[in-house]
Amino acid sequence: MIGIDIGTKYIKLASLEKKEQAFHIRYALMGLNPSQAQGAKQAFNWYKQQAAGTNPSLGQGAKQDGLLSSKIKSIAKESFPFDKRVAASIGGCQIISRNLEFASLGDEELQGAVLLEAKQSVSADLASMYSDYQVLSTLENSKLDTLFIAVPSNIVDRQVHLIESSGLNIEIVDIDNLAMTNCYNALDKNAKKQSVVLLDIGHSYTNIAVIDAGALRFVRNVNFGGANITAEIGDIYQLPQETAEEIKKRPDLWGELGLNIKNVLRKSMPDLLEAVYRSMEYCMGRKKIMNIDKILLTGGTSNLWGIDFFMSDALGIASERWNPLDYVECGVDSKKALGGFLSVALGLAVREWKKT
């Protein structure tokens, strides 16, 4: 099975095989999302409209979808010529998530209770959304801690159409938070021994998952990503986005320019820091988790030099980069450099071995 993560900047594809209870990489690749050819700022704004549920011009949207479908097809044809089965996911703040608690109920009763409670707690029209739920755990008061997820149906339908137009067969549609949680639990041998906040920091948004000894406790998404850091650097020096992006990737230039990356992160990251803090506060306040051992950073923006140290200082919790390919036999060492980008794609790929 191929895991496909269609990000705002990169398209990532991954496939795994399992030998003697250990995972090995078959393929792990990524290509630039063709939207980036429009120019970083224009592409970012276009995707923000999509994520907010507002449709850009129909002509532009159709052209964008055609380019995306062709790109996926070209990567898949080159790398996965015989495998057509796909697991994909949805990310961003268009996802609605709610943690709901219920008394112990049978399956049918629980389903009805979840839908009733969701209608009361969600302001959006659930009739225009695909929704599902998952029982996370049984709490100390014997109640079922249940995660409800809803995604606008047009977002899901578009994703399915994109992939099927590429000649692939989509079997699973997940959300990024669950996919990266599956990746962490399947690959990291320490997953059952620690409580973590896992952050997948992409180009335009961040997926958050609070995980306690392998058990998912809470998910949230934030409109923050590498594009925000690039924009802050551009504002400081009055530079085009493309130049600011290049400077962001070159810490060897920061001293010459007098760029203080801590100040850049301090100005651009308050929403993310607050979201992480509130997520931990919520889980500990409701005794879903006793403590947080560390914060794990993955996603393309986790490669930014110093972001892990800044997160540690800002929140007072040990923070480090997390590369899922550190726990997988890659065959070619150079592939490990892609690991920070692949947590969602790999988490989708492991669904082939996940029973539920």
Image: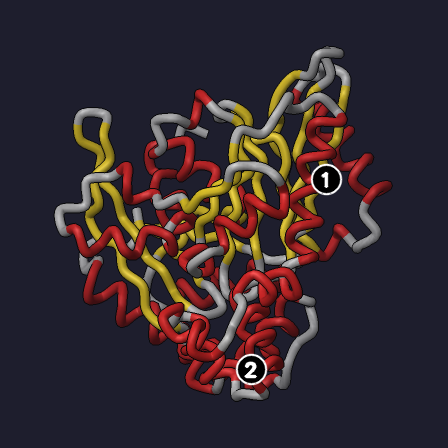
Of the residues shown, which amino acid type is indicated by label 1? Arg
Q: Can residue 69 be seen at all in this image of the molecule?
A: no
Residue 31 as seen in the image, left or right of residue 288: left
Quarter where residue 281 is shown: top right
Q: Position of residue 136 (x, y in %)?
A: 60, 26
Q: Which mark is residue 41?
A: 2
Residue at image coords 76%, 27%: 285
Residue under label 1 = 98
Q: Is residue 348 above or below residue 290?
A: below
Residue at image coords 52%, 39%: 295
Q: Can residue 155 be seen at all in this image of the molecule?
A: yes
Asked if the residues shown at circle 2 and circle 1 are in contact, with their CB atoms under 8 angstroms apart, the answer is no
Residue 285 as seen in the image, left or right of residue 18: right
Q: Is residue 234 above or below residue 179?
A: below
Mark 1 residue crowding within 10 angstroms, few (<14) / some (14–19) / many (20+): some
Residue at image coords 50%, 65%: 203
Q: Nearer the viewer, mark 2 or mark 1?
A: 2
Q: Helix, strand or loop at disc 2?
A: helix
Q: Helix, strand or loop at disc 1?
A: strand
Residue at image coords 51%, 55%: 201
Mark 2 residue crowding within 10 angstroms, few (<14) / some (14–19) / many (20+): some
Q: Position of residue 274 (x, y in %)?
A: 71, 49
Q: Is residue 62 above or below residue 15?
A: below
The front one of 337 and 38 is: 337
Q: Earlier in the sequence, mark 2 or mark 1?
A: 2
Residue extending farthest to the left is 331
